[in-house]
Amino acid sequence: MMKLAALGAKVLRLLPPEPAHNLTVKALKLGLGPRRTTPASKLLATRIAGLEFPNPVGLAAGFDKNAEVPDAALALGFGFVEIGAVTPRAQPGNARPRVFRLPADGAVINRYGFNNDGLGVIASRLAERAHKPGILGVNLGANKDSVDRIEDYVTSLVALDGLAQFFTVNISSPNTPGLRALQDKAALDELLARVVEARETMKSRPPIFLKLAPDLTDEDRADIVASLLASSLDGIIVSNTTLARPDSLATLHASQQGGLSGRPLFQPSTKILAEFARALDRSLPIIGVGGVSSARDAYTKILKGASLVQLYTALVYEGPGLAARIVDDLPELLSADGFACVAEAVGADL
């Protein structure tokens, strides 16, 4: 089944990126994706923010924008899945074409712009699978034309009470104009205060993470750390896509506008992950994202301070069996360095 899935992934790369992605989601809805049936090694079990993860490898937001295939994605071997981003009102996103493969670089540039079916539709889908096993997170976004973007996060958070195990406040997408301004200290303090206040009204009192951009100055990072330590948030996700364009990019589409993800993001995202880990000094867990395409990549982020990792872009090039391969290979890396569990390895290189 894995070989068939890998062949399918190669065929999909012959199609333009967005139609290929949509077809992948449809195939998973029809049950055509591979299924990992072997439990993950007990070495990989870890507890973060009160949640028990069977393994630390998650599917990042952006793949299943509309909560159409969370369980099929979990069946690929992921320890958790994050859907979205979800906005209160449905929106089409930016004009097409809006996603571009950079195959020579193992990368993708996208400028989707939070295209999604909207809170009402997605809430209904989540309600249908609310009692199924598996850890599900929801990435929360803001509508492009919203007058009060902070209220958008609050609205969706409260409306989805009990329908997910954790939530991510995404203020770092580069494809909604002005959104990253919410990372500025005054705006961030207000955002965190209102989100935490809203959580107090919810029955489930879910963990909430903040997803950050990699394109931060030292001053930005210091301000964000101060705001986080003064709040009751449960952790951060580092990092979203980057607006930077490394000189090493070899593909024609490198000049396209949007967020760059994949292999070129690995080094800068891991660097800022380590910087946040040092600054927070284990006071908050970190989910490491950016350029993960192997067990070694995942392990590197763990050693630099990530309690969990996420991936998405690498699936384009490595196929749907990637999560299972990482989950199979990661225990050997942990054992070779004498770690009895993931938690022991977190931040070991710092």
Image (cartoon, rainbow, N blue to C red):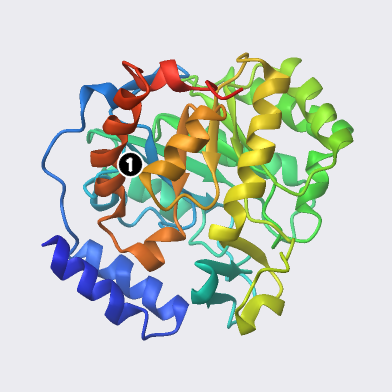
Q: Image quadrant of residue 285?
A: top right
Given the current orientation, which residue lies at the most extreme front position?
336
Question: If the image is split into quadrants, where does the N terminus sit?
Answer: bottom left
Residue drawn at x 50%, y 19% as measured from the top left = 205
Q: Nearer the viewer, residue 211 or 286?
A: 286
Q: Image quadrant of residue 173?
A: bottom right
Residue 286 lies left or right of residue 327; in this view the side is right
Question: If the image is split into quadrants, where does the C terminus sit?
Answer: top right
Residue drawn at x 79%, y 40% as measured from the top left = 183
Q: What residue type is labelled 1?
A: Ala
Q: Residue 315 in the image: state x and y as whole percent.
A: 38, 61
Q: In this view, does 265 lie above or below 327?
A: below
Mark 1 lies on a secondary structure that is helix
Q: Name the residue under label 1.
A: 127
Q: Residue 247 in the image: state x and y as whole percent.
A: 73, 68
Q: Residue 75 in the image: state x and y as whole percent.
A: 21, 47
Residue 204 lies left or right of residue 2; in this view the side is right
Can see residue 95?
Answer: no
Q: Residue 133 in the image: state x and y as whole percent.
A: 23, 33
Can see residue 105?
Answer: yes
Q: In this view, does 307 lie above or below 132?
A: above
Residue drawn at x 25%, y 56% as measured from the top left = 321
Residue drawn at x 74%, y 55% as measured from the top left = 146
Residue 107 lies left or right of residue 145; in this view the side is left
CA neighbours of label 1 inside 10 A, class few (<14), some (14 to 19), many (20+):
few
**Across the whole image, how many numbered discs are drawn on residues?**
1
